[in-house]
Amino acid sequence: MPLKAPKIAPSARMRLLTGAEAAAHAMRQINPDVVSVYPITPQTPIIQTFAKFVADGETDTEIINVESEHSAMSAAVGAAQAGARTMTATASQGLALMIEIVYIAASMRLPIVMAVGNRALSGPINIHCDHADSMLARDSGMVQILTENAQEAYDLMVMAPRLAEHPEVMLPVLVSQDGFTITHSAEPVSLLPDEEVRRFVGDYRIPYPLLAGEVVTQGPFAMPDYYFEIKAQQVRAMRAAAQVFDELSEAYQACSGRRYQAVEGYRLDDADRALILMGSSAGTAKEVVDELRAKGEKVGLAQVRLFRPFPAAALREMLTGVGAVAVLDRALSFGGTAPLFAEVAAGLFGQTVSLSSQVYGLGGRELFPEQIAAVFHDLESTEGLEQPRFIGLRG
Amino acid sequence: MPSIKQIARNEAASSRFVSGHSLCRGCGIPVVVRTVLNSIEAPVVVINATGCLEVATTRYPHTTWQVPWLHIAFENAAAAASGVETAYKALVKRGRLPDEPIVFVVFGGDGGTYDIGLQALSGALERGHRFLYVCYDNEAYMNTGIQRSSATPFAANTTTSPAGKQSFGKLQKRKDLTAIVVAHHIPYAAQASISHWQDLSDKVVAATRLASPSFINVLSTCPLGWGLEPNQTVRFARLATETRYWPLYEVIEGHYRITEQPLDPSLPIRAWLEDQVRFKHLFQHEDAEVLARIQREVDRDWNNLKRRSEADAQWFARHSERLAKEWTGSAARPAPAMTSRTNTNP
Ligand SMILES: Cc1ncc(C[n+]2csc(CCOP(=O)(O)OP(=O)(O)O)c2C)c(N)n1
Ligand code: SF4
Ligand SMILES: [Mg+2]
């Protein structure tokens, strides 16, 4: 099946950028106070591009080139606690190494923004894309956004600080893009003017008292008498993030013309079969939907952008009337249910819809349009299908 | 240099670390914390690694700390301090914070410093963040119930290096962390002890005058883990120095200087070991071989240190004027008044 060029309205500010460069431009325009980072493929071009912006004086962010991702996240927490707008970036093993501190950042309610170039987790060691790294952070308390292309990677990075810093939210936000497929592929990207981004993001006004001469104890030890309540506050913050994301999308549309939903339906209106997936493959899948629609097949898809908080209600509404749904996961949960499938199944509980779990693309394995078309055809009868099915697996 | 009167006055005027914590009776840690914090006139921000100090002082919603204080995890105090210090630089540069000195003080135990936090410490020292890192070295993971660390002395009995029918306790010699720190070429590193408060206080003043990382390794008796009565805390810290097991010295720009000479240089290590329960097994059947080995290593390490500091004496003679000037120069910075230290209830 032939692929069409991405549908982005051309503008004067259109630049040919990789996803990594696009994310770095967003960081340059946001101009955070502190960025603490450690290199790892395929994230490295983000921090290299950003380091060059700093070296050229285009932003005066303080970069900390730490000695590990564990320290990158730890320094980010220290900086955020000290009142700095703080960002970091990582992938795969780096995110795995950070995880301990990611949970702590979320519990401390620190609005740190993290750019991720999704990459499979070892072992075996592999540098290519899947979503295992993001899924490892699934229960950490971070807001998680998975983007489809370089434009989205840029736009959602610009939106991220406001989401993270919203007083009802105050949580770290992870904005990921598929490793190599997006991080290293050049596409036309429309950048907002620098002043527009600064205006959109606004000044940093988080009242962290560590450097303000106040007596304050940050990160104390909580026993069974308080721990549970602190977790419940995180639950409420995560709930608020869903609402804030929608409000911000509207605000962002007003200045960019582009609108991002937590979950986006594509040609679902009269669909009898649908796919649900995240990341760059959504682009390919939309092409397949168009091809099949042209042949009169009633197919559509739902692209999940906001994985945490998971937009279950919107998804349920969107899929009303759809008879069969295949959930395409780019990650596994050994001995359990693939993560996106688990969310969808919980979200659609009680609906009369047949669900199929399909896993694709692990360790960077390609997903071809024909394979997506085959998934739609399988959905005509999901009886007796082995779950999960593995797309493109040999043997 | 603050005298004991000045330290006591600071403590009385506005205590930075108040009572009500749950550290054990006789624990050496509060001596470390109070002596360090009361020797610093400027406002401080404390970053603390997980361990006895953190756990026993911050049970939510209570706190012992009357200064801004941050804890994140066990192995990352130096990385956390890197972030705080960099944020300070960024915010001053961008005009969001006044350009007034704040001293960043990190407290970590031996486990959090010699072992799990060594990488973060090394990274932060190499990057040159401005903070004073104080390791309170009680020679084991005490908070989790006396497990061996790489600071635990050879032959000590801990719950993970137990003495038994086939074992005399920890089989390995302790790591020389101060030497590792010195290898980072930071301008100030020192070893101190809770028994020598003036020496510790002087070292804190020297260390915090510099716009660079500095490090002090403080021996801190743990009556529980060492097996001592709580009233023996200071005595056993002192004996560690008197028997030359824990010499007090400083390393300035790579040059060594012993700051306290033992009163009786022939006092055997036995005098320190004998009454500690963690070494009791060595005396039950008089393990002469192990005891001789401990003495040999103490003598060798002490002689090495002595030789080094004698060789560096000339360097100190040559540079004393410059050091005095540089250090007085930085000390002459207007020290912020102590009134910026709020005293709210925990
Ligand atoms: C990553 C991690 N591993 C293990 C622990 C458990 N733990 C907490 S404190 C501690 C020992 C601390 O030892 P030390 O640094 O010497 O401080 P002390 O307890 O002696 O004050 C351990 C093992 C932890 N909190 N985090
Ligand atoms: S266990 Fe040791 S170090 Fe910990 S509080 Fe008790 S005496 Fe102090
Ligand atoms: Mg210890």
Image (spheres, coloured by chain):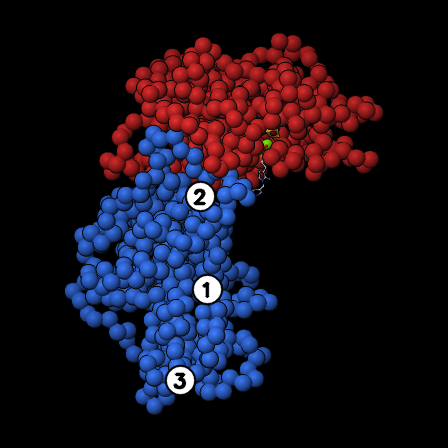
Chain colours: A blue, B red
- Say the numbered circle drawn on residue A131: 1
Q: Are marks 2 and 1 in contact (CB under 8 Å)?
A: no
Q: Secondary structure at mark 1?
A: loop
Picture coordinates of residue B12 (x, y %)? 43, 15
Chain ID at mark 2: A
Looking at the image, residue A103 lies above or below residue B10:
below
Marks 2 and 1, how far apart at CA? 23 Å
Query: Which amino acid does the dot numbered 2 rest on?
Result: Ser
Q: Secondary structure at mark 2?
A: helix
Q: Secondary structure at mark 3?
A: loop
- Say the numbered circle drawn on residue A272: 3
Marks 1 and 3, how far apart at CA? 28 Å
- Say the numbered circle drawn on residue A74: 2
Task: Give the quarter of the figure containing the C terminus of chain B.
Answer: top left
Splitting the image into four quadrants, where does ligand 2 fall?
A: top right
Relative to A59, B182 lies left or right: right
Q: Which residue is most to the left?
A: A12
Residue ID at (47%, 47%):
A229
Quadrant of res A182: bottom left
Chain ID at mark 1: A
Chain ID at mark 3: A
Tag nearer the camera, 1 or 3 = 3
